[in-house]
Image (cartoon, helix red, strand yellow):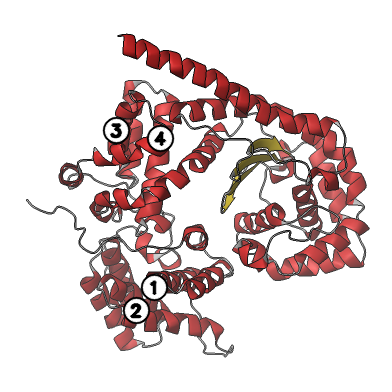
Amino acid sequence: MRQLTMMNSHRRLWTIALSALICTSLSAPAAESQKKTPEVKRSTEPSHAISVDVRPQLFATLCALDAAGFESNLNAATQSPGRTQLRQRMLAMQGPATEALRKYYQEHALGDSGATLSRFVSFALAAGPPPKFAFEINRDSLPPDALALEGFNEVLANFYKEAQLDQLWQRYQPDYERGVEFYRVPVAELVLTATTYLREIVQSSSPRTFAVYVDPLVGGKTNFRNFGDHYALVVGMNPDLPLDDIRHAYLHFLLDATAIRYRTQATKATPLLAYAGSAPRLPASLRDDFQAFFDECLVRAVELRLRHLPPANLSSEIDQAEKDGYVLVRAIYSGLSGFEKSEPAMSLYLPDLIKGIDVPSEARRLRGVSFADDSPANDVASVDTRTAAPAARPSVSSDPVEVQLAEGQRQISARNGAAAAASFQRVLATDPDDLRATYGLAVSSALLGQPDRARELFAKVIAAAAAETGAEQKRPDPSSLSWSHIYLGRMYDVEGNRDSAVAEYRAALAVGDAPDSARTAAQHGMDAGYQTPPREAKPDVKP
């Protein structure tokens, strides 16, 4: 009892100290903003590891998108009069810089408005301050999304001057600062709760940073990025704060480095990924990247602990996470009870938590789990075949080619490389240039442990996209093309050829209309590389 009392006393003192540190960190930017210093000077102020702030680069970039005619699919009825007025003002802009901006936008916009916004937000997070917006880091360290907008720095700088955005920023800055104040206390409470639970202290001088940038122009969608050690979440101004999104992003900030540090210990649970891989809803980027998969399950388990749900709701949430493919959440959540009774921070305790996962028992249990079906709206031909839901039984009148393609995709989802290859080969026997079947056979070859054959087929898909346009020339769909680059990048990573791997990941991110799953996988490849799971790790399939 004496020991327990001392532990609780230590924790109370530690929490008080941590609370003071976090509140100081989050309140410091507000004091700076009240000085009304020019936005250019703001970037030279001392940085804080955790902050809620505004970013003039975002304001300028989003104004430019408005002027270019970007449609965000937001409900106009929910937009403030000031937001509507600003958009109308930007659309009415005329001048050589504005015309150059609109031409640039047309050349770089993607088919999906969300993906287009994501690309320009990445640029704004990587760009330096106005009026030049020059990148302040080495080109090789730039996020691929920013690299895809080659030359936008100058285009934006010219538009910034022509549209007099410096004066417009001064007009709107008070509204932005009020938004920061609106977020500051809830974010501080969230940060304190998560940091206290994990018993981690983030020094204000830490090179790792987490920033919440408030910008009403982004609407209701949050945009989360991490460039190496720098994590940023861009949020709008809605009455219902996206606190779940902020907490999820902040837990990644706290836990990613720890998960990477103990990735070797975590590989003991690799066999469970074979079960998760058959879950249609599991993102493609996690299906054969155990490090990223373990990290995401860890974050989700901690989230459940922090939400303090009633028992019935908690059980339902864990069941749903498992049905979605996050099969480690249940075991990690259970292991967190031991962490809560211990003293070390999570950065020191995680190996003990991993050691407590009973992999054979979990594998036996998972054999009886029924995973949730994917959305029926998904078009099998346009998504990564590794995430395709089991195909519905085709009708008698179905196109034989489509039937074989769907069956091949279903077998890949079940990780049956031989059966998948047979389906795709039947298509290629009729049409050797069918790129969907070529890509499917490439994935099947990778599943069968035939890297040379897989590499040759992925290269064929990529070559078809680069070939000169002809009347009969077939082109791969964006999903097949982007994932072909990602698979090649992973192969190079496994071989230790990091430069070639990075080049492939960048090429994947440059594919227009690439699905979010591919963009996520490519970005992870850029940031952390790819390591194949140990070959000897097999799922427990004993009866």
Closer to the camera: disc 3 or disc 4? 4
Pick whichever of labels 3 and 4 is earlier in the sequence.
3
Amino acid type at image mark 1: Met
Pick whichever of labels 2 and 1 is earlier in the sequence.
2
Q: Residue at x 36, y 20 (%)?
A: 310
Amino acid type at image mark 3: Gly
Q: Residue 491 bears which disc, if any?
A: 1
Amino acid type at image mark 4: Met
Q: CA distance from mark 1 to mark 3?
A: 34 Å
Above or below residue 417? Residue 432 is: below
Closer to the camera: disc 2 or disc 4? 4
Q: In this rendering, would 370 be left or right of 177?
A: left
Pick whichever of labels 1 and 3 is earlier in the sequence.
3
Residue occupied by mark 3: 335
Q: Residue at x 85, y 60 (%)?
A: 157
Which one is nearer the viewer's eye here, 97 or 29?
Answer: 29
Which one is nearer the viewer's eye here, 181 or 33?
Answer: 33
Residue 424: x %, y % from top left? 30, 77
Residue 351: x %, y % from top left? 32, 41
Closer to the camera: disc 1 or disc 4? 4
Q: Residue 454 bears which disc, if any?
A: 2
Q: Residue 346 bears which disc, if any?
A: 4
Q: CA distance from mark 3 to mark 4?
A: 12 Å
Answer whether labels 1 and 3 touch (C-beta < 8 Å): no
Residue 196 in view (yes/no): yes
Q: Residues within 10 Å of mark 3 (few under 14, many from 20)?
A: some
